[in-house]
Image (cartoon, rainbow, N blue to C red):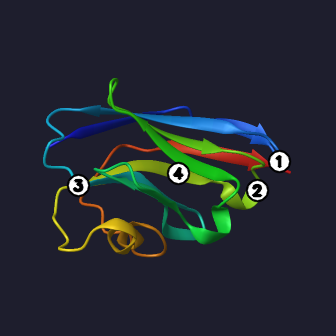
């Protein structure tokens, strides 16, 4: 099972950008999906972006164009790039993973990890993102 360690959170003004990083430690060979979810305050848990073992990615539809996910496989680091941030993006952001095979792949598989009930089974301690107006 992997361990996930996030970094890169902080406070920014509206319109600013942040890059969150997640170091993936341990054996990730049986980890099928990685991604990010956020929650905090009035915000319930919400899957933000995900990437599968083939490198296919998805981003929650209303965040597309502002958020993107990527992974540096050589360094075992997952990234979440966030641009044009607004106060509604304020939350704790968690790097997450799933080691449970779903039986579906591609876009259908990834859809289980964005939106209100992301199906992650492992997550880190989280990193706070605060956006001021």
Query: Residue at image x 29%, y 52%?
Result: 97
Q: Are marks 1 and 4 in contact (CB under 8 Å)?
A: no
Mark with earlier residue (1, 4): 1
Residue of label 4: 92
Q: Which residue is mark 3?
A: 32
Residue 118 position in % (x across, y down)? 38, 69
Give the side of residue 132 with respect to residue 115, left or right: right
Determine the secondary structure under disc 1. Answer: loop
Name the secondary structure under disc 3.
loop
**Circle on res. 87:** 2
**Of the image marks 4 and 2, the number of the one nearer the N terminus:** 2
Q: Position of residue 64 (x, y in %)?
A: 65, 61
Residue 87 at x, y percent in the picture? 76, 56
Which dot, 1 or 3, sits closer to the camera? 3
Question: Residue 103 at x, y = what percent?
Answer: 17, 74
Badge 3: how crowded within 10 Å, few (<14), some, or many (20+)? some
Q: CA distance from mark 1 to mark 3?
A: 34 Å
């Amino acid at each position: 099972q992997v361990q996930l360690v996030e970094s890169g959170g902080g406070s920014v003004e509206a319109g600013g950008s942040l890059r969150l990083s997640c170091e993936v430690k341990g054996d990730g060979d049986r980890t099928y999906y990685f991604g990010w979810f956020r929650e905090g305050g009035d915000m319930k848990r919400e899957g933000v972006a995900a990437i599968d073992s083939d490198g296919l990615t998805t981003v929650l539809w209303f965040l597309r164009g502002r958020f993107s996910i990527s992974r540096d496989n050589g360094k075992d680091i997952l990234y979440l790039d966030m641009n044009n941030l607004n106060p509604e993006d304020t939350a704790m952001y968690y790097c997450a993973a799933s080691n449970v095979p779903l039986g579906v792949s591609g876009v259908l598989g990834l859809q289980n990890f964005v939106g209100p009930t992301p199906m992650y089974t492992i997550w880190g301690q989280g990193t706070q993102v605060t956006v001021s107006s």
